[in-house]
Image (tube, coloured by chain):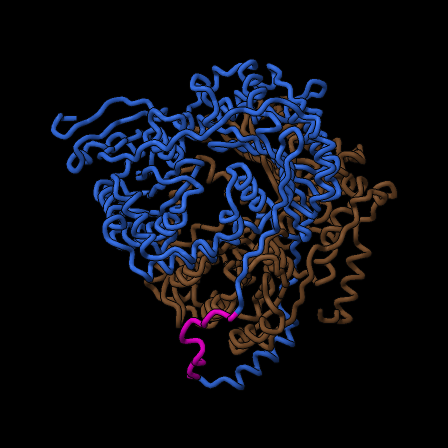
Amino acid sequence: MIEMNRKARILVLAALIALPRPAAADAQAADAVTSFPFAFQDYRLRNGLRVVLAEDARLPLVTVAVGYAAGSLREKQGQEGLAYLLENLMFQGSENVPPLQHITFVQKVGGELNAVTTPDKALFYETLPSNQLPLALWLESDRMKSLVITPAAIERTRQDIIDENRARSAADLYYATFAQLDMLLFPDPVYGHPLVGEGLAALTETDVQEFHRTFYVPNNAVLCIVGNIEAARTRELVARYFETIPPGPEIPPLPLASFRRENDAVVRFARIPDGNSGFHMGFRFAPLQPGDSECLRLLEYVLLEGETSRLRNRLLRRDLTARYLTGGLDERPGVAALKLFAFCTNAILVARAEKAILAEIDRLKTNAASAEELAKARRRFKKDYYDRLSTSMGKARFLVDAVIAGRDQEAIRRDLDRVLSVSPQNLSSFAAKYFVPQNRVVLEFGPK
Amino acid sequence: MRTPRASLRSPGPAAAVLAAAAAFWLAGASPAVAQERFRRTPPLPDAQRLELRLPEVETFVLANGLTVAVARRPESRLVTLQLVIRAGVVDSPADRPGLADVTARLIGKGTKMLSSDYIENMIESIGGEFTAAVFMEYTVLTLTVVDENLDRALYILRLITLEAAFGERELGGVRRSLYWELRGRKKDPEVLGWGQLLAVLFENHPYHAAAYGEEAIKLIGARDVETFYNRFYRPANAAVIISGPVDAATMAQRIGNHFGAWSGPAAAWAPPAAPPQNVRDRLCYVEAAEAEAATVFAGNIVMGSSDPDFYPVLVLKQILGGTTMSRLFQNLREDKKYATYAFSEMEVFSSCGVYWARARVRPESLGPAIREIVGEIAALATGPAVPSEIEEAKSYLVGSLPLRFESPGGFADWLARYVALGLGPGQWDRGPEEIKRVDAERVRVAARRYLAAKPVVVVVGRPDWIAPLLDGFEAVEVYDASGQIKHTLRKGDGG
């Protein structure tokens, strides 16, 4: 492992001070303290590329993941869809890899691959037999170094995305409402637009080239390799394939969110003639303070994970006001949201279900969660956490997410402990601070 | 997607470092430097021996006939407990299809002393996740926990399975949820197509029971569930499987403590003989009024899970449509533009299995697409696969196999299947060796044996897409979404 520099140590100390302080009784919980489940090392190449390696020799597999801090937050107004277009163009060929052959090379050896674009990044990853590590590095370095962007490829890819989006809309009556919710919940032109936006049709080759030149560069990327590897050999290969790729210009800072703040909760209705009655409910948390993220991650489990969680128990088991309820956290740089989605039998039950949710959250503000409730949430969180990190791909994605979010080694290692240390009082304070009408958005839908 | 905590800090190094790095590169780079030679061609794989080493499965049988299987995975913090019952979808009585599903879903919904809510609280209080999955020939009840909660999890698993009670209220809830689930699935053309293919291939065979609809669920009563439970949920018909950071000796004692007193006679069961392959032209059309595209299935009966032909047929399935490089995808999507995707799959049971091609096809290309799919299957049966195709298929299968075992869930599913079907070591971790041993001759023989017979073709699509099909096919059997035949259209009868 590399030594932490002084600045990093100061950051860790600051983070530790800001940690939610465990309540005395909770600190006794035998299963509250744990350790990070695997070792990793990270370093940086001369061109700025951040490299993270983790050895896992259980199976003859390796995952190579490359994340670029080039998500939809990097799009300018009018460019909505550009980040996702670029993600797709990454499969359209580079200097030595013909169009779509990246997929063929990986599949030929039995590998799996995929890519995803989120507000903060574009992530590309493949898992393949571990002796094929050079192949994966060759492929990823070729498209990092020499992606071929042609007007024809842009046009073809743009049309594919439009078709795919149209097919999704046709297949899912509620598809559009998810994008509508985001626009209401993140009332900011950069933070609130959907992945495939209206700007897609008007994007020019210049827009695409400029975005690529600025953000798809080693100094804006992290390369993570997890699996049956030998660190010294892997470092050699990484140097061979990536070290001579020139860095790009200095990366501009992320745009700061500026959310329009209403005086009360925002409530809207979307008519879906052939659909069921239901609603989205979203709560915005911004600006996030140290410790807030940990509170939120545990709160999600208290409210939503498992049939006996607060909201599922109340709506689906006790009151029977909803037929279906799901939800989760949406974390973006500096802001997060808790989103709920429910189907109800009719509009009257929609109103009752919404009221019940608000009552449960209000109860959390005034009466701290019980020790049993919190212990249950912690245990389930821990199980899911270990499950997520049980594969090389899961580990790689976790590390890339963490690095792009700007977290250092110590913060990563203490990640689980920090969430398990959240106390009932932390949760109550958090709820009282953020669950206010001004942060709430409701989007009801139904036939009328 | 869930992401870890985000911050406003960008991931790049400090600005000064970046500026220095950029200056370094700009100074050193000439405008038209030729690329390094090693970038021109894909590199050779490392000379690293790829060895698939799965944990040994230690198996023993308790005095009451219960099989116990333990797989030690010391690196995992999760323990997966499974109770496998050797009875699945096909064991439901002919007049009560779906009974196996309803019974499995009722496990964990109450015991003689405890309510459903109480049990859910117990499971969730240890951070556990309980699931029930019913396959064609077996059922798997799974409880996953972090290792520190293992003892409590064992107690709960024993309690909810051995002391299960089936109250009318819980039964009503399960019936309702399964009813709506089955109804909802009918909107998925893939589900409709697969169900119809099974119904036709297993016509007059016990496995036909797998193709039941939501109406059948209404007939199931508490007495049916009890009868099914008492017949099949018996120690000699079951296995307890544990995978995680455990050792076999300790687990043997604990399982004995919890499950040793379980008693009851064994259920007599033998897999039914394989049905004959379909040999005649059959085009079945399932009407789905709101379909956006046509979904095509084409398949037939193959051998069972322990048959020596399993691996050659697996290679054939891969050549036909295993990936985007395979024949179906390249022909139907890349060359002819008929389909948005085209793949092939295989599922095997004790005595037989099914292979099938599936494609999502543009309605205007439906007839030609069906001909191409059937043609690709026939081509594999009559013309041998070329050696490079065989090697590529084998390479894919060997390379991708370990991916199945990575997660605790994937590993446990594999283990449950292995134990439930009583498979030999060749189906545990020797898959790569078995695949490597498949040669062109075995592929040729298997192709002639299983792919030469005409596949059953099932199309799911809008009613108005049927008529043009009669230009190329003698007859089209038309079904509704419940699998009931409406009528058969024949060429020249005017529809």
Decide which of B151, A185 is in the foreground and name it: B151
Most distant residue in the front direction: B63
User: Is residue B351 shown above or below B7?
Assistant: above
- Figure disc tally: 0
Residue B168 occupies which quadrant of the picture? Answer: top right
What residue appears at the point 85 percent right and 43 percent down from the top-left corner? A28
For residue A102: magenta? no
Residue B2: percent from the left, percent from the top? Answer: 60, 48
Residue A207 occupies which quadrant of the picture? Answer: bottom left
Region in magenta: B32-47
Chain represented in brown: A
Q: Does residue A12 appear left or right of residue A354 in this picture?
A: right
Most distant residue in the left direction: B492
Chain represented in blue: B
Residue B410: percent from the left, percent from the top? Answer: 56, 45
Residue A180: percent from the left, percent from the top? Answer: 51, 41
Decide which of B260, A251 is in the foreground and name it: B260
User: Is residue A96 shown above or below B172?
Assistant: below
What's the magenta bit mostly, secondary-structure-wise? loop
Most distant residue in the right direction: A24
For residue B39: magenta? yes
Q: Does residue B245 appear left or right of residue B454 in this picture?
A: right
User: Is residue B463 shown above or below B320?
Assistant: above
> Quadrant location of the C terminus of chain B?
top left
What residue appears at the point 41 percent right and 43 percent down from the top-left corner? B307
Decide which of A220, B419 is in the foreground and name it: B419
User: Is residue B59 shown above or below B434?
Assistant: above
Residue A319: percent from the left, percent from the top? Answer: 64, 21
Q: Does the rendering let one see residue A78? A: no
Decide which of B194, B454 is in the foreground and name it: B454
Q: Does the rendering let one see residue A165? A: yes
